[in-house]
Amino acid sequence: MAKTSMVEREKRRAGIVKKYAVRRAKLKELIRSPKSSPEQRVAAQAQLQAMPRDASASRQRNRCAITGRSRGVYRKFGLSRVKIREVASRGEIPGLAKASW
């Protein structure tokens, strides 16, 4: 089980990312656009840098939905490798079975 503070930090980050997503996308598009002037680009870069660091989606970490474990998390299930094995052994994931040959 992960520390509660780490799980809560990730929840807070997710909220911040969601809050600033549209604003960040507009600024990044303005920076990338060949039609924008150099002054507009510089202003957009300054505004982007003034935003909170946690507004960037790349600062989020995938965590297991059950335990909060940060490593070995499968995106498809949202679970860590340890919990996937346990849940799959009980037959709780449709279409997933333990291999045997």
Image (cartoon, rainbow, N blue to C red):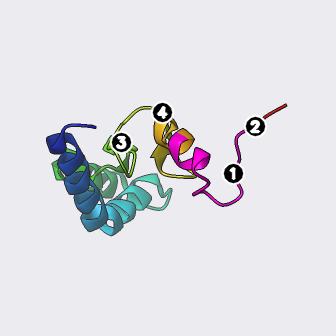
Identified by mark 1, the residue type is: Leu
Cα distance, mark 4 to mark 3?
11 Å
Identified by mark 4, the residue type is: Gly
Q: Is residue 7 visible?
A: yes
Residue at 54% x, 52% y: name it: 77
From the viewer's perspective, tell me whether residue 86 is left or right of residue 39: right
Q: Are marks 4 and 1 in contact (CB under 8 Å)?
A: no
Q: Nearer the viewer, residue 88 or 67?
A: 88
Task: Estimate how packed mark 3 is, as few (under 14), some (14 to 19) or many (20 or more) residues with alpha carbons within 10 Å.
Answer: some
Q: Nearer the viewer, mark 2 or mark 4?
A: 2
Which mark, by number, is residue 99? 2
Magenta residues (range): 86-98
Residue occupied by mark 3: 61
Q: Is residue 95 magenta?
A: yes
Which mark, by number, is residue 72? 4
Residue occupied by mark 1: 96
**Local SS, label 1:** loop
From the viewer's perspective, tell me whether residue 14 is left or right of residue 95: left
Identified by mark 3, the residue type is: Arg
Q: Quadrant of the N terminus?
A: top left
Cα distance, mark 2 to mark 1?
9 Å
Q: Is residue 49 visible?
A: no
Q: Is residue 32 magenta?
A: no
Residue at 19% x, 47% y: name it: 9
Q: Are marks 3 and 2 in contact (CB under 8 Å)?
A: no
Q: Are marks 2 and 1 in contact (CB under 8 Å)?
A: no
